[in-house]
Every structure is written in structure tokens, then in C-alpha cells.
Image (cartoon, rainbow, N blue to C red):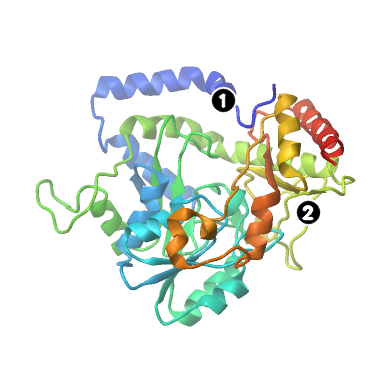
Amino acid sequence: MIPLCDLKRQYQALKDQFDAAFAEVAAGAHYILGPNVKQLEADVAKLCECRFGVGTANGTDSLHLALRALRIGPGDEVITTPFTFVATTEAIGIVGATPVLVDVDPKTFNLDPAAVEAAITPKTRAILPVHLYGQPCDMDAIMRLAQEHDLHVVEDGAQSLGARYRGRPVGSFGAAGCLSFFPSKNLGAMGDAGMVLSNDEELAGRVEMLRRHGGQVKYYHAELGLNSRLDELQAALLRVKLPYLERWVELRRQHAYRYNTLLADVDEVVCPHELTETGPVVPLGEPPAGDGQLVHAAYHQYTVLVDNRDAVAAHLKEAGVGHAIYYPVPLHLQEVHAGLGYQPGSLPHAEAAAARCLSLPMFPELRPEEIEEVVRVLKEAIVAAK
């Protein structure tokens, strides 16, 4: 059995450090917004080249609170992608705004800037790019549009911690960058956790206030907020992992390039593309050193496109190869967004990706021989599915 993601290997490697961190928090008996939360906020903000980090209970709350802090609400429109997890549009809906879904680039699966530009109206207040699977969006184009039309940019970086665009960490471009520390993420907690990044002191202050019932001082509340505090124990465990993140991301990149190389002669498989100055390409060989390239993808997932996807997936399952479909139904065709009026065929690139996408095993501790076995079984599955 080769799992899609094996958290046990990471736990075993760091078990003694986790045990020590847990014991220290328990002995200190400071369980809510304690020293570990404060230090993690500072350390992640520094890593992402932001002035402020505000811990939250989860990634969804990070998006929600960032939009609230920007005073986006009823009557406003937020342009985003249909090819993502529902938390992205959920956060927009929770604040009372309307998600405007536009098509994706068929090679990177990220927001198509041309589609974004065509969707801007007088009601548009923000663009919400999702760095899907750890692949950075075209932030030059997105930031240009935001500047030209006086729009906020809120980055959904739930899958992209450790990724860079032009040498700069994703999450640091917009008014806010929103992170998730869900257990399987590149930096994962042992439960739910999240963070909002920003270089704007006022915005960070509003997020900090809103996350604890809308008040700066205990029992004094300026507006309705929510209870969305990053847990002290989760912060301590994340601090154990944080020094390893750069190495783990590099291992993910090595795994992705190995997959690409092994699949280069398989015409039936479309491998992940990375943005370059001349357009998206499938990178082969070894990942380049340094940050000279346009993007430095973090490969939270390794996702390919295949025909007869469901039959291929069934073969992988039978052979004991972990896999997943992120995401089988794009958001514009989900029941929750039926009221937005989209129909099948409205956003063809997102729909095509949803019909063919298949994520293969990807985690730092994945072994080269396991990747070779995954590729062998995948090739076998493609033949069997014809």
C-alpha cells in the first residue's frame, strides 16, 4: 500500500520533539493565545515576508476574517475560481458578498487573469486567487488588475505555504494572505488551525479583534466577531515542524520532478505545469536551485489529467495506490451555488479539469521506489481503462 499522504512517518521522525512540546504546554497551563501562538505568528509572518501574522482556528476562518476585516459584505462582488475547495466561496458568502466565478487557465488550473478582467464590474471589491495544489497564480497580472481597478487582493494560500512567485512568498502580495494548517497541508497541525498574513497594521488589528468576539479588551466588544483562536497546543506542535518546512517543500518539488520525468513519455497523462516567463511548461529533471525562476511551486498535491479517470482511479485502488480527486465538481455547478445562475458549459476549462484530474501520492517522506511503483501502476491502469 502506498498512501496518498502518510502523516505517521512525519510523526515518528519528530515524536520526541512533539512529546516535549506537549509536556511544556501542559505544564505551563496557558492554553489560549499563549506564548507559542505569539511566537508562531511572528515566525510564520517572517517566513512569508509579512509584518503581521494572526492565528485563527482554521483556514476557512482565515478567509472569512480577512474579508470581514476589509469590510467586504452585502452588495459586493469577489472574483474567484470555481476549481477549489468550497471554503473559498463559503467565506465570501458568509460575509454576505457574492462570489463571481471565472474560468481557469487549462494548464495551471489557477485563475485566468483575462477572465478576471472581463468579470470586473462596479460592484467588484476584491479578487481572491487560490494558489491551487501549491502552484502560484500569475500574481503580476492579478496585482496589475487590482491596482488599475482599485481592488483588494486576498490570497488563498491554504495549499501553498513555501511557494514563491518571483522569489517572493505567496501570501505576501495582497492585502491579506490566508493559510490553513489542516493536518495534511505542507505545514500541518494535529487538528484544525490557520493564520492571516498581512503587511497592513490596521487590517491585522481588525482580524485580531474579530477572531476573539470583536473586542480588543476582554468583556468589551466593538462589533460582532467570532471565536476563532489558534489553539496554543497546535501552535506548539507547528513550531516543532516549522524549521523543517523548507526541506519538506524541496522534497515535494523533487518528487514532482521525478514524477514528471517518469511520465514524460506517457501521452495519456498531462503532468503539472509551472509558470515561466514564456508560459506554462512541465518541468523535467531536477528542480532548479535558488529563486531565479518565475515560480517556486510547493506541490501540496501532485495532480495530473487522465482520460477515463474513474476507471484509472479504480485500478489504482485495487493495486493499493493512494489517490484522490481534487475536485470532482467545480463550484459553479454545486447545489450550494445554484442561485448564481451558472450552467454546465459556463466555465469549460474548470469543468474539463474536474472531469480528468487525479492526485497521486505526495508527501515529503515518499520514497523514490514508491514513486516508480505509482508510475508503473498508473501506466498499467491507463492501458486497462482503454
The answer to whether 183 is drawn above or below residue 85 in the figure is above
Amino acid type, residue under disc 2 in the picture: Val
Name the quarter where the N terminus is drawn. top right
Amino acid type, residue under disc 1 in the picture: Gln
| Image location of residue 227, percent across then percent down | 24, 44
Q: What residue is pinned by disc 2?
A: 282
**Sequence-first tag of 1 and 2:** 1
The dot on residue 10 is 1
| Image location of residue 363, percent across then percent down | 63, 34
Residue 50 is at least partly visible in this image: no
Residue 146 is at least partly visible in this image: yes
Compute the Cα span from label 1 to label 2: 29 Å
- 312 horizontally vs 36: left or right: right
- 323 horizontally vs 75: left or right: right
The answer to whether 167 is drawn above or below residue 287 in the figure is below
- 309 horizontally vs 36: left or right: right
**Residue under the point 67% across and 54% down:** 353
- 49 horizontally vs 323: left or right: left
Q: Secondary structure at mark 1?
A: helix
Nearest the eye: 2 or 144:
2
Label 1 crowd bin: few (<14), some (14–19), many (20+), radius 10 Å: few
| Image location of residue 321, percent across then percent down | 71, 28
